[in-house]
Amino acid sequence: MNAPRRAPDVPLPRRMDFEFDDAIPKWWFADNPVATAVANGLHLVFPEGERFFIRSVKHYMSALQDDPALLARIQGFFAQESLHGREHGHSFKLLERQGFDVQRFLDFYERKWLPRIERAAPAVVCLAGTAALEHLTAALGESALTEDFLDDAHPTFRALLRWHAAEEIEHKSVAYDVFQRVSGSYGIRVLGMALGLAGLMFFWTVASRDLLKQEGLSRAEVRTHARAIRQRRQDHTRKVLVRAVTQYLRPSFHPDDNDNYHLAETYLRQVGRLTA
Ligand SMILES: [Fe+2]
Ligand SMILES: [Fe+2]
């Protein structure tokens, strides 16, 4: 096994200002309404999800005052996540101009259920959920940078998703290191993965289905478009998540065991944003 690489000391925030203009087609992903609804569903989940990650880690900052290096990485993580939420949030306006009601899902997710879950779950479980979801977003990020499925996306969304993917890799170990510092319990770590994964899949599915329903397609049309996605091998998300969860269950796991920082570095250098 290769020696694990360490995370960059401080993840750098990069303000991108993507333009989601009306030249972007409604079915911007592979000219396919199912693929586009699934991708747009993830956009709807991201911003509040990332604010939840920030709140989960912020809760423990007073306990980490003796570790300035970790505190600096946390600040970089906060800055990156809030810019991710901002950019994905900008794409909501495009969805609205395309005729989608996004507020219905956002009310369900951001106003109703996520606050209830957050109030009911102990802070350490929220943190464990964040650490687990950060591992999953880094795994999805690796696949976005190494596989060619995003070649079928509109260039603006492709750039958004690959920039986000690269930064998810850059800060993948921050929440995990905070969790190890304040708890380190394997049982809570696994519980965080179970709840985090279930929450992600639930809200992502509800958002995607809501958007797809608004397309007004027949069942037969949806089936045909879904078959086209499978044929283009754009349904590999499940495989990526299963592999990532299996890795996470190893008691000695650390995000840096997966040597992929160079993927983020290569992409960011390629788009001229390595140094922000
Ligand atoms: Fe993010
Ligand atoms: Fe993240």
Image (cartoon, rainbow, N blue to C red):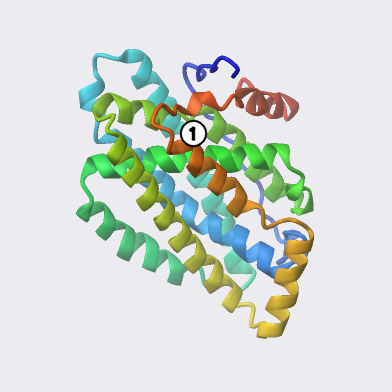
Between 269 and 193, the residue placed more toward the observer is 193
User: Which residue is at a point 55% across and 55% down the rendered structure image?
Assistant: 43
User: Which residue is at a point 43% across and 33% down the rendered structure image?
Assistant: 250
- Is residue 254 depicted above or below 165 in this figure? above
Q: Is residue 233 visible?
A: yes
User: Which residue is at a point 43% across and 64% down the rendered structure image?
Assistant: 106
**Secondary element at tag 1:** helix
Which corner quadrant holds the N terminus?
top right
Mark 1, Cα crowd under 10 Å, few <14 / some 14-19 / many 20+, is many
User: Where residue 172 appears, x then y in whole percent?
Assistant: 49, 31
Between 115 and 22, the residue placed more toward the observer is 115
- Is residue 26 depicted above or below 276 in this figure? below
The residue pinned by badge 1 equals 80
Between 113 and 195, the residue placed more toward the observer is 195
User: Which residue is at a point 49% across and 41% down the rendered structure image?
Assistant: 246
Callout 1, which amino acid?
A: Gln
The reply to whether the residue tagged 1 has its Cβ within 8 angstroms of ligand 1 is: yes
Q: Quadrant of residue 30?
A: bottom right
- Is residue 221 depicted above or below 84 in this figure? below
User: Where residue 210 appears, x then y in whole percent?
Assistant: 52, 73
User: Where residue 37 appears, x then y in whole percent?
Assistant: 62, 65
- Is residue 252 depicted above or below 120 in this figure? above
Q: Quadrant of residue 114?
A: bottom left
User: Where residue 213 appears, x then y in whole percent?
Assistant: 58, 78
Q: Quadrant of residue 27?
A: bottom right
Q: Is residue 83 visible?
A: no
